[in-house]
Image: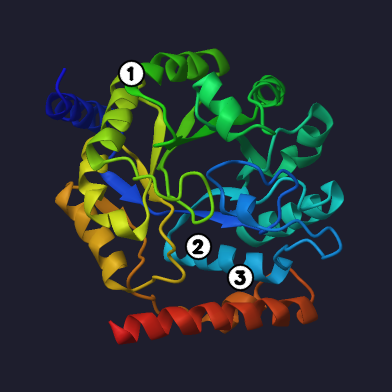
Amino acid sequence: MKNDELIVQAKKVYAENFPLETCFERAIFFSWHCDIRDCAYCFMSTQKVDDAKPKAVRSAESLLAELLICGKLGWDVGFISGGIGAFGKGAFTDLLKKMHELSGEKFWLNIGALDKETLKEYAPYAKGVVGSIETVNSKLHNKVCPSKPIEPYLEMFKEAEKLGLERAITIILGLGESEEDFDAFKEMINTYKISKVHLYGLNPQKGTIFETSKPPTEEYQAWWIAKARTTFPKLDIQCGIWEDRVDRISTLLDAGANSISKFPALKRFGTDFAKEIEKQAEKAQRKFNGTITILPGIDWDAEINNLPFEDTFKLKIKDKLDKYLSRMKKNQNKE
């Protein structure tokens, strides 16, 4: 089947199973530290190892301020993530509890392969777990993720199912896989009852082996999305794009993606890039839920006051929130 015909079919399948809507999904990252640091595509693999320095972990008030913005602007939280080993178990549990208290939500967790006991500890605040598989091609995976084998993630999926947690995977297109790897992708989804997939495109990082590589084309990313949609009509599919690829969003939505991610929405809020995303959703005949272009009239002080935390901690959250909002307002006014 030609790509155009596949996309037409995928668009029809999507409309039969989902409302004609889309949204921006924000992945909330809590660190710039990772114990592994050898995934060949990752920025953190280029960083010098200095165990004497403290781990680069964001403060709880910064993360909570970001989460508050997500909720008020209608952004879905794609998952909570960060480098493997950045947080101790108890500290991360405390963070999840605070995030749950602020939002009332449970979250997808993308923090490495978790064992049974860890899953049980996080389960009260977790909607599901995300396996950062990156590629289902086993030979390629061994090359690009030498210290992040697939098998522990598969064990995590089994334990997560026992606890009633959903399962998701991330895939980075452009690492060297091909359309022939779709069968392995299909098998993984069927075997582990994966309900959500994140289909990203390679973002070449300076200093990595992919520095001079070209990102996957619009047509190639659309093929994977459309093939996944027509094969799994009810699968939640998220398309990851960067600001240099916003012009492909309508095609990816037509191919059957549910939502959009990877756009740096806090830094680029209200810019022409953000406006183009909303225009692209309209072009694909999707209602765009939430906003990445216009700050709504919200009494942010009242929102802070209503948080279920001590006053001193609320002031710390407010300080971070004000800094984020200031940059977002500046972008909006500039544009």
Residue at 36% x, 24% y is: 178
Q: CA distance from mark 2 to mark 3?
A: 9 Å
**Given this view, does label 1 or label 2 mark the residue nearer the observer?**
1
Q: Which disc, if any, is residue 231?
A: 1
Question: Up-down: is 256 above or below 246?
Answer: above
The location of residue 273, given as percent across then percent down, is 29, 66
> Is residue 287 shown left or right of residue 122?
left
Secondary structure under the numbered disc 3 in the rendered image: helix
Q: Is 113 positioned to the left or the right of 251 in the image?
A: right
138 in relation to 109, above or below: above
**Callout 3 amino acid:** Ala
For the residue carrying disc 1, how many other residues have a C-alpha within 10 Å: few (<14), some (14-19), or many (20+)?
few
Q: Is residue 124 above or below residue 177?
A: below
Quarter residue 94 falls in: bottom right
User: x, y percentage for residue 124?
Assistant: 73, 41
Q: Earlier in the sequence, mark 3 or mark 1?
A: 3
Residue 70's disc number? 2
Asked whether residue 104 is in view, the answer is no
